[in-house]
C-alpha cells in the first residue's frame, strides 16, 4: 500500500463518519483488560499517527479510560470509533469500522500477558507484554 491511503468508516446508525490516512495494512490485537471490557474481546485495530476527520462530531462521546488515553464512540448507537493517546499522536481504529475489502494483515499482538486462555490467533505475529508496550511508548518518537 502506498503512503497516505485514505480510508473511510461510519458508525452503525450513520450519525458519525470518519476519514483517516493510513500508511499500512497492518492490524494489531490488543488483549488488555480495558479493551476486553470495552468490546467483549480483544480490540482488532489499525493504527495511525494522523488525526482522523470526523463528520457528526456532535454525536461523538469521548471517555477518558486512563490517565493517558481516551476512547470515542457514537452516543446514539454505541459503535466504537477510536482509541487515542492524549499526547503523542497515536490513534487506533477498530478494523471492522474501516472500509471493507482492504487486504488487512495481522501483524502485532499487545498486552499478550493479559490475553485470556479461551482463545488464540493462528497468525504468526510479533507480541509485546504490557510492560513492553509502556516502554515502547515512553521512548521519544525519534529513538
Image (cartoon, grey):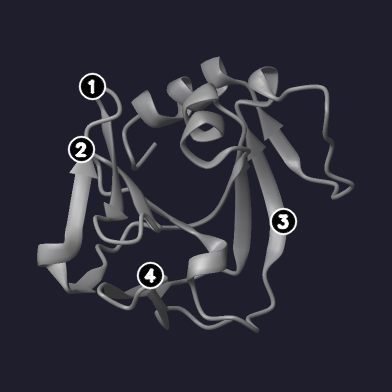
Q: Mark 4 or mark 3: which is in front?
A: 4
Nearer to us of marks 2 and 4 is: 4
Label 2 SS = loop
Q: Which mark is residue 141?
A: none
Tell me the crowding category of disc 4: few under 14, some 14 to 19, or many 20 or more residues within 10 angstroms, Cα based: some
From the image, tell me which residue sits under label 4.
11
The answer to whether mark 4 and mark 3 are in CB contact below 8 A is no
Q: CA distance from mark 1 to mark 4?
A: 26 Å
- Mark 2–mark 3 Cα distance, whole angstroms, equals 25 Å
Q: Position of residue 19 (x, y in %)?
A: 32, 77
Q: CA distance from mark 4 to mark 3?
A: 23 Å
Residue in the image at 58% along x and 38% along y: 40
The reply to whether the C-beta atoms of the residues labelled 2 and 1 are less than 8 Å apart is yes
As drawn, the label of residue 106 is: 3
**Above or below, comparing residue 30 to residue 19 in the picture:** above
Q: Residue at x 55, y 63 (%)?
A: 95
Give above or below for 114 relative to 124: above
| Label drawn at residue 67 | 1
Task: Assess whether mark 4 and mark 2 are in contact (beta carbons under 8 angstroms).
Answer: no
Q: Residues within 10 Å of mark 2 (few under 14, many from 20)?
A: some
Instruction: Give the position of the N terminus as an image quadrant.
Output: bottom right
Relative placement, left or right, of 30 versus 119 is left
Amino acid at each position: 500500500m502506498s503512503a497516505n491511503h485514505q480510508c473511510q468508516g461510519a458508525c452503525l446508525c450513520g450519525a458519525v463518519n470518519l476519514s483517516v490516512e493510513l500508511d499500512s495494512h497492518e492490524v494489531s490485537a490488543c488483549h488488555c483488560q480495558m479493551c476486553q471490557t470495552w468490546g467483549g474481546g480483544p480490540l482488532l485495530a489499525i493504527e495511525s499517527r494522523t488525526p482522523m476527520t470526523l463528520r457528526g462530531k456532535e454525536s461523538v462521546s469521548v471517555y477518558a479510560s486512563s490517565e493517558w488515553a481516551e476512547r470515542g464512540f457514537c452516543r446514539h448507537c454505541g459503535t466504537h470509533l477510536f482509541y487515542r493517546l492524549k499526547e503523542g499522536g497515536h490513534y487506533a481504529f477498530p478494523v471492522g469500522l474501516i472500509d471493507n475489502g482492504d487486504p488487512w494483515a495481522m501483524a502485532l499482538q499487545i498486552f499478550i500477558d493479559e490475553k485470556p486462555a479461551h482463545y488464540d490467533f493462528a497468525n504468526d505475529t510479533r507480541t509485546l507484554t504490557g510492560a513492553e508496550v509502556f516502554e515502547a511508548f515512553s521512548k521519544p518518537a525519534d529513538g
